[in-house]
Image (tube, rainbow, N blue to C red):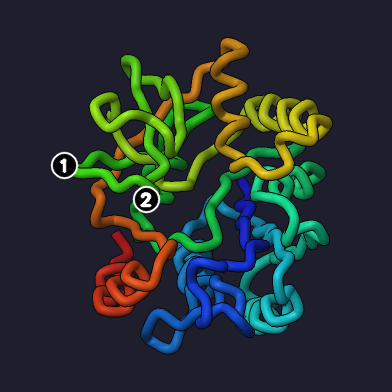
Amino acid sequence: MKVILLSAGKGLRMMPLTKNTPKCLLHVGNGLTVLETQLEIIKETPKIREIIIVTGYLSEQIEAKVKKYKNKLNIKIVYNPFYDISNNLVSLWFAKHEMDSDFIIINGDNIFKRCVLNKLIEAKRDMCMVIDKKKQYNIDDMKVTIEGDRIKRVSKEIEMDKIDGESVGIMKFQNGANRVIKNILEKMIRDKKNLNVFYLEAINRLIEEGYAMYYVEVDENDWAEIDFHPDYELIKKNIEKFNIKE
């Protein structure tokens, strides 16, 4: 099993902090950046053998940062030269050559407990998304609708009265499901209108084509993401809870 980390974006909503620093290299506490926090959790997950980091904005900083992990983790950098004129569907497509075996996708601005990865890996479903459920959702949440044990749709545009949960930004493809998503990405990238969409549109496409995307649910306090400055401040304040290896 490998992890594909999507860390190419410019993090414009986090300016000026990201003016000279990739968002994944913002410090969150305990002397660690977002990326290092992810790597520390991943290296404690025995079934993960390789990490692919898709970079773009200020890639040289990320490449320098991960050098200290070269003796601990098998890390490969995939560079997306179009990071400033495209969205993360293009970044994921650039990692297509890494999709011939089982993999997990993780957003580059996610902080999470080890239990989140463990629950996803242990799930018997070959195509599976991590979600949470909470009492209130924000307009910027990547929301999902559910039908039975399957994801029906994922989008920020889902109406508030139809929301069943929120996508955490972590999902797994294995035992052939990896080839399914790879083929869908290959088809979507040929349409210019998809150059600026989230890769989760590929999930909607595979659902439309009749494939089943299942889900595992985690507690909303088991993870966090950095979209805006208040998110960042909250993570720094509560970073200790993400060091729990459970």
Marker count (numbered): 2
Choose between 162 and 107: the one closer to the eye. 162
Residue that numbered label 2 is attached to: 116
Of marks 1 and 2, the one in the foreground: 1
Please state the horizontal and vertical placement of residue 26, each as a whole percent of the image. 50, 79
Going by the image, does 81 lie left or right of 87? Answer: right
Task: Where is residue 161? Give x, y as percent.
Answer: 24, 27
Report the residue at 72% width, 51% height from top: 86
Q: Quadrant of the C terminus?
A: bottom left
Q: Nearer the viewer, residue 114 or 142?
A: 142
Local crowd at mark 2 within 10 Å, few (<14), some, or many (≥20)?
A: many
Q: Which label was assigned to residue 230?
A: none
Seen at 66% across and 77% down, the residue is: 66
- The numbered mark, 1 or 2, whose residue comes first in the sequence reads 2
Q: Residue furthest top?
A: 210
| Left or right: residue 164 compared with residue 106 | left
Residue 241 in the image: state x and y as whole percent.
Answer: 25, 70
Mark 1, secondary structure of its residue: loop
Front residue of 202 and 239: 202
The residue at which mark 1 appears reads as: 135
Of helix, strand and loop, which one carries label 2? Answer: helix
* Residue 133 % position (x, y): 24, 39
The amino acid type, in three-letter code, at marker 2 is Val
Label 1 – label 2 distance at C-alpha = 20 Å
Residue 97 image-quadrant placement: top right
79 relative to 60, above or below? above
Residues 48 and 164: in front is 164
What residue is at 51 percent from the left and 56 percent from the top? 46
Residue at the image position 74 percent from the left and 30 percent from the top = 188
Q: Amino acid at mark 1?
A: Lys
